Image (cartoon, rainbow, N blue to C red):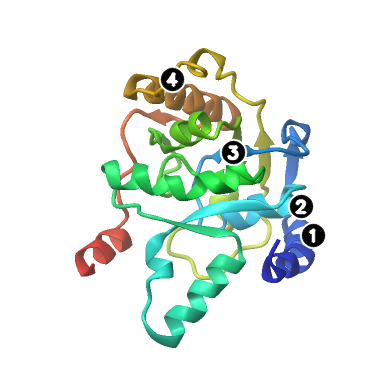
Amino acid sequence: MSALYAIGKATVAPIIRIAWRPKITGLDNVPRKGPAILASNHQSVLDSVMMGSVMPRNVYFLAKDQYFLGPGLKGAALRNIMYGLNQIPVDRSGGRASLLALDAALPVLRAGHVLGIFPEGTRSTDGRLYRGRPGVAKLALDAPAPIIPVGLMGFDKVLPVGASLPKLGPKVEVRIGEPLDLSQWQGGGEVDSRALREVTLKLMNAIQQLTGQEYVGRYAPKRPDQLATDADS
């Protein structure tokens, strides 16, 4: 664990628990040791901070690679902060590039750590749960590692899209489900696209059962800020 992450765990996490008093259920579903993937719905920019603050183990998260590519001293400073907070750069441009970029997370899992990931790929702006991307399934089968579905409730009210400061008062909840049974897809050699789709659908169904969100069988649309970033790159 980096010094920066340790400081955050000792300072930010208690503040979050005191300020919002999140209701947490299913914490015993997170294994005390060994690799694991925490796969959650995604509605707020604070989701990774909130989820990391309530977990008993240190959690690594995937972050878009633009945070790591800035030029000059400012870019270097941000890059060091991101690495210090256990953030792993990943290409979010979509398609095969994104799938291959997830290989950067394999060493984390194979070293026995916990990985946090949002299978929708981006935040939902309308409260619905969108189709999951296959990278989570690929990581789980390649590592191998159990997938633990997580439902985050109310965090979109704490920091709505477009807001600059978090709000006190909204009730928040973290629901942690039982690890998915992946036995039928394991041990069969190379993983094909059908297996990835099946595992992904099983995961999104599990998250939907935890949150009660309306499920949308298509990928989440990019937000206006993402489209602007893509146009500039």
Q: Secondary structure at mark 1?
A: helix
Q: In the picture, which quadrant includes the N terminus?
A: bottom right
Q: Which amino acid lies under the numbered mark 3 shown in the image of this protein?
A: Ile
Residue, x 38% and y 76% (percent of image)? Answer: 70
Q: Position of residue 92 (x, y in %)?
A: 35, 52
Marker disc for residue 37: 3
Q: Which amino acid lies under the numbered mark 2 shown in the image of this protein?
A: Arg
Relative horizontal placement of residue 69, taking residue 207 as reference (left or right): left
In space, the residues marked 2 and 3 are separated at their CA atoms by: 24 Å
Q: Is residue 124 in view?
A: no
Q: Secondary structure at mark 4?
A: loop
Identify residue for label 4. 189
Discs 1, 2 touching: Cβ within 8 Å: yes
Within-10-Å neighbours for mark 4: few <14, some 14–19, many 20+: few
In space, the residues marked 4 and 3 are separated at their CA atoms by: 21 Å
Q: Which amino acid lies under the numbered mark 1 shown in the image of this protein?
A: Ile
Identify residue for label 1. 18
Marker disc for residue 21: 2
Q: Secondary structure at mark 3?
A: strand
Along the line of sight, the residue nearer the viewer: 24 or 96: 96
In space, the residues marked 1 and 2 are separated at their CA atoms by: 5 Å
Residue, x 35% and y 44% (percent of image)? Answer: 100
Relative horizontal placement of residue 65, taking residue 85 as reference (left or right): left
Q: Which amino acid lies under the numbered mark 4 shown in the image of this protein?
A: Gly
Within-10-Å neighbours for mark 2: few <14, some 14–19, many 20+: some
In which quadrant of the rendered view does residue 48 lie?
bottom right
User: How many discs appear?
Assistant: 4
Discs 4, 2 touching: Cβ within 8 Å: no
Q: Hey, which residue is sitting farthest top in the picture?
A: 184
Q: Is residue 216 above or below residue 229?
A: above
> In this rendering, which labeled residue sits more in front, label 4 or label 3?
4
